[in-house]
Image (cartoon, grey):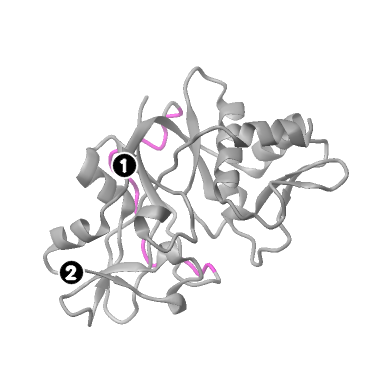
Amino acid sequence: MTQQWYLAQAGRLRMSGRVMLLAVTSSAVLAFTPYWPSVAESDQGVPPHSVSAANRVDPDDPTVLQPMNEDIFDSFCKDRIGEAGAALATDRQPADAYSLRCQEDDGTLYPSNEVTDWGDVNRMMEDACGWKIQENARYIGRVTNLYKTFSGWQCARYEGNAGAPDFEKWCQSTQQFPQLVNRGRASSRYPAYRWACARQGGGGRQLSISVDEVCQQQYGENTLAELDNPYGRKYDDAWSCFYYGS
């Protein structure tokens, strides 16, 4: 297929989402911990400090969640873009979930190597999920581990937008860690991952934020969270909540 196909697809509206775990650290500050594989707080993608298995979503239920992998994504790219198949953007080192690209036969990448609208990658992954599952339902791609590439994505059945998560309210609900803090660039290269809950005054131990739990507290148990923009400097620009279904 041609670039025109992809540009037409990129015009479609979509929503995104995602989760994490409550974990207190005594000496190190934890970053956001995504759905069940945790995302580490450093640029190097070190092993996670903690893991959260979403207790309200059955990971074995293929009507709700399905994994993405390199073979599936490669087949999607070959069917929709060109025989060169799947590729990784060369300007993102180390590669991560937002490095995924499809490659035309002449080597052109879709989306382009230097993405300015991260929604382009989200829309491409929604198309890949719909192509993979081929059911009369909408599936979106959601990041489960930002520091992985093909396996860092998951297809989730989407039933509608719930709204933006409220990190401040969630921190206040913990009582012991009522203050939302931004831990700065040193904690992660991605602004979306720099938030944590702290004790009053911001000092001492901090609590990682489970975005899935934030969504479920606000909008009900049948919601999940998704990373919309890893570079979103406001948490409600970076994350969203959506209703999932089966």
- Graded by Cα atoms within 10 Å as few (under 14), some (14 to 19) or many (20 or more), the crowding at tag 2 reads many
What amino acid does circle 1 point to?
Gly
Residue 177: mark in rendering: 2
Residue located farthest toward the left when viewing the structure as drawn? 175
Residue 86 spot, x, y in % from top left: 73, 44
What amino acid does circle 2 point to?
Phe
Residue 22 spot, x, y in % from top left: 27, 60
Q: Is mark 2 on a helix, strand or loop?
A: loop
Q: Is mark 1 on a helix, strand or loop?
A: strand
Q: Residue at x 24, y 77 (%)?
A: 205
Task: Decide if residue 40 is on the left or right side of residue 102.
Answer: left
Residue located farthest toward the top when viewing the structure as drawn? 136
Q: Earlier in the sequence, mark 2 or mark 1?
A: 1
The quadrant holding residue 133 is top right
Q: Where does the magenta region start and end? A: 45-62
Residue 76 shows up from this direction: no
**Which residue position holds label 1?**
163
Q: Residue at x 26, y 51 (%)?
A: 214
| Residue closer to the observer: 207 or 179 | 179
Q: In this view, does 150 lie above or below 90?
A: above
